Image (cartoon, helix red, strand yellow):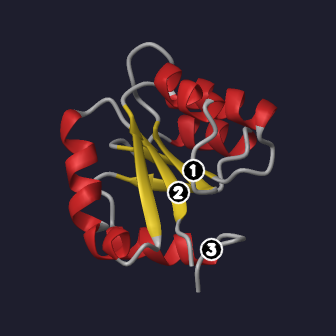
Amino acid sequence: MSGLSILVVDDEADAAELFRQRFRREARQGIYVLHFANSGDQALGLLDDAIEPELLVILSDINMPGMDGLTLLERVRQRFPDLPVMMVTAYGDDERRRRASQLGASEFLTKPVDFDHLKEQLRLLPGAAD
């Protein structure tokens, strides 16, 4: 079985290391391949380059300098209407949550991320590994 890709978009330097640690076993087993972008622009560039293996989901922070997560979500929706995008935020901001839902976010996660819950949500996505 070839794995599925997860694109994590977060401007915080420690986010990539945290995801690597929490997905170490799944990565070693070839279930998920993690890709990282520290900005919305960088994420769009990675999408232009066609991420391999097949992209399962984008996990994007909402609050980032430059292009924020909501703008990224909007751009992803225009180009990849069926690609699940989960939004992550440190704040329980109801207005941003409402806007993310309107734009088609498939899930809304609050920092610190509950990785057990996240992994459960990933298993429910279309095309996910059983």
- Left or right, 31 with reference to 91: right
Find residue 98 and report its image quarter: top right
Helix, strand or loop status at disc 3? loop
- x, y percent for residue 108: 52, 54
Q: Residue furthest bottom?
A: 130
Q: Quadrant of the C terminus?
A: bottom right
Q: Which mark is residue 52?
A: 1
Image vertical order of residue 83 relative to residue 14, above or below: below
Question: Extreme top residue here?
Answer: 66
The residue that label 2 is drawn on is 5
CA gap between label 3 and label 1 equals 15 Å
- The local crowd at label 2, few if under 14, some if 14 to 19, many if 20 or more residues have their Cα within 10 Å, is many
Residue at mark 3 = 128
> What amino acid is found at the position of numbered circle 2 in the picture?
Ser
- Determine contact: label 1, label 2, CB under 8 Å: yes
Q: Amino acid at mark 3?
A: Ala
Q: Residues within 10 Å of mark 3 (few under 14, many from 20)?
A: some
**Disc on res. 109:** none
In percent of width and height, residue 126 lies at 72, 70
Kindly report the distance in space between the C-alpha atoms of the residues bearing marks 2 and 3.
10 Å
Q: Nearer the viewer's eye, disc 3 or disc 1?
A: 1
Residue located 73% across and 45% down the image = 104
Q: Which is more toward the observer, 68 or 17?
A: 17
Q: Earlier in the sequence, mark 2 or mark 3?
A: 2
Residue drawn at x 68%, y 46% as measured from the top left: 101
Residue 57 in picture, x, y percent from top left: 59, 55
Corner quadrant of residue 84: bottom right
Q: Amino acid at mark 1?
A: Glu
Label 3 close to label 1 by CB (< 8 Å): no
